[in-house]
Amino acid sequence: MEFGTMWCVLLFSCLLRDCSTHSDFFTSIGQMMDLLFTEKDLVKSLKDYIKAEESKLEQVKRWAEKLDELTATATQDPEGFLGHPVNAFKLMKRLNTEWSEVEDLVLRDMSDGFISNLTIQRQHFPSEEDQTGAAKALLRLQDTYKLDTQTISTGDLPGVSTDFPYKSTLMPEDCFELGKTAYSEMDYYHTELWMAQALRQLDEGQVSSLDAVTVLDYLSYSVYQQGGLERALEYTKRLLTLDPDHKRASGNLKYFEYQLAKQMKAAIEPKRLQEVAKEREKRESERTTEYLPEKRKYEQLCRGEGIKLTPRRQSRFFCRYYDNNRHPYYILGPVKQEDEWDRPRIIRYHDVISEREMEKIKELAKPRLRRATISNPVTGVLETAHYRISKRLIAGYGMLRCATVHDPQTGKLTTAQYRVSKSAWLAAYEHPVVDRINQRIEDITGLDVKTAEELQVANYGVGGQYEPHFDFGRKDEPDAFKELGTGNRIATWLFYMSDVTAGGATVFPEVGASVRPKKGTAVFWYNLFPSGEGDYSTRHAACPVLVGNKWVSNKWIHERGQEFRRPCGLRETD
């Protein structure tokens, strides 16, 4: 008891001693005046906090009102809205980046209801990869259709009318994000273009959270990486006028000045350098005129350039009613057939699929869309196809899958990186519409579809494309369709199930042919000669969709079962 009392006395005396050391403030008005100013600062801080809370709520309110108006418009016609690639990119950017900023803002206010809802919904949000993919799609469209950054930024894309209800513009921060995407890929050409566009819009006075210093930092470096020392120096000087203490810019300034001085002292003077560059450009121009790489041919055809449709060739193209040698089903109601090309022969059939059938096919496909994959011709396994930008549906998988192609090394079906799409396969037993369509293809072509692959449905997204490829397996791919056991792909039937406002043509670079999508039509061509040899002129590609939403479905018909329907020829090219 005494021990406890002693500790209480000691503690009390310590508290008194502590209080006495701070109690001299009341003995000095001067010190008390200091406290008043301290309190005033506290009140100011409190008001700043209140103002920050009000500002935060006002920001959230403005954001909500803006998004309310945008989503109300967008959800009236989601397909039309997302058909504009800028809208699709900004949707990816909003959900991946801007909604996170809103989350951070609201978290400070402990708004548990909103955060809980956002957390639940986040599982459905696009990833960083999605945003990057959408950005790369815009860059791809820019290159393929030779669009300048101003055209894309204002949303005035080819094929978009002035009264287009979903036209969208890019803000400086959007342009900056596109530049950053290019920068992360060490694509300094596009980095410069988009950073310069962001800077231009900032100079025009567009309100943005982005500062010019950050843009100039990227811009000067990207210009330098492309050999533009003088311009890099100019951008760096401008940066330093805005931020004199910028350490990296200060170091770059000295380095650029040193390099320029060194260049001036070089044996070859700048004027001579320009002459050498012009000579090199001239030689390069002559070389590329003689031999156009396939990619350039493909992009030219996508823009409607370089189509080898001469008057003489066109005079051999006709439209006719076709009944496939008096097929009972088509004697009274023949189909409308139109020649699209002669070698290879590409035929378009008009009004061969109804609106109701197309909608049913889309309805069956949408829940199953996945990233396009390809069949590896060596291993036969499905892998992601990165050259095809679309999605397609495979029966039994329950969702659309990425497009697949055959990997020439392994033979497996792999996701095609050159195919940007989502796709799916539909079996005949899944719905009477699918069965009816399969039968229609057999009746019109005269080929047996029992050994054909299932109906493939593909939806091309932002900048959706499928770069030049063959549908048939080549001689160096002997096991391309070994797993199917039905031989090579003898022919291709392709339905167009939507009109495309701009872009999206099917082009044949080897022969300079271009086929525009037209809803309700189908095109057909043979991939193999009657001899069974591959027709290399059928190499084709799906151009990037510039504006609109492209839906197609195709049927790959195989050799087995066609022995008496398309007899073998005696010569290789028969």
Image: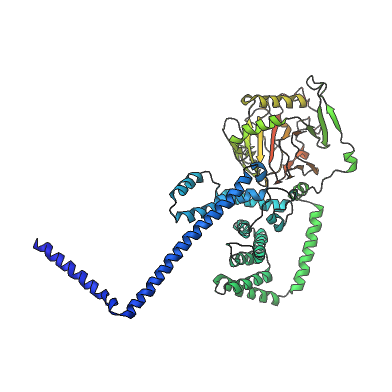
Residue 313 seen by the camera: yes
- In the picture shown, does residue 409 fall above or below 93? above
Please tell me which residue is depicted at 21% across the width and 73% down the height of the picture.
17
**In the current view of this chain or complex, which residue is farthest to the left?**
2
Residue 272: quadrant of the picture: bottom right
Q: Position of residue 26 (x, y in %)?
A: 28, 76
Please tell me which residue is depicted at 84% across the width and 28% down the height of the picture.
321
Count of marks placed on residues: 0
Q: Nearer the viewer, residue 23 or 102?
A: 23
- In the picture shown, does residue 101 fall above or below 518? below
Which colour assignment does the render follow? rainbow
Residue 200: quadrant of the picture: bottom right
Q: Position of residue 192 (x, y in %)?
A: 66, 62
Q: Nearer the viewer, residue 227 or 237?
A: 237
Please tell me which residue is depicted at 73% across the width and 32% down the height of the picture.
493
Please tell me which residue is depicted at 68% across the width and 28% down the height of the picture.
452
Quadrant where the C terminus is found in the figure: top right
Residue 455 seen by the camera: no
Residue 44: quadrant of the picture: bottom left
Going by the image, does 404 lie left or right of 104? right
Going by the image, does 221 lie left or right of 323? left
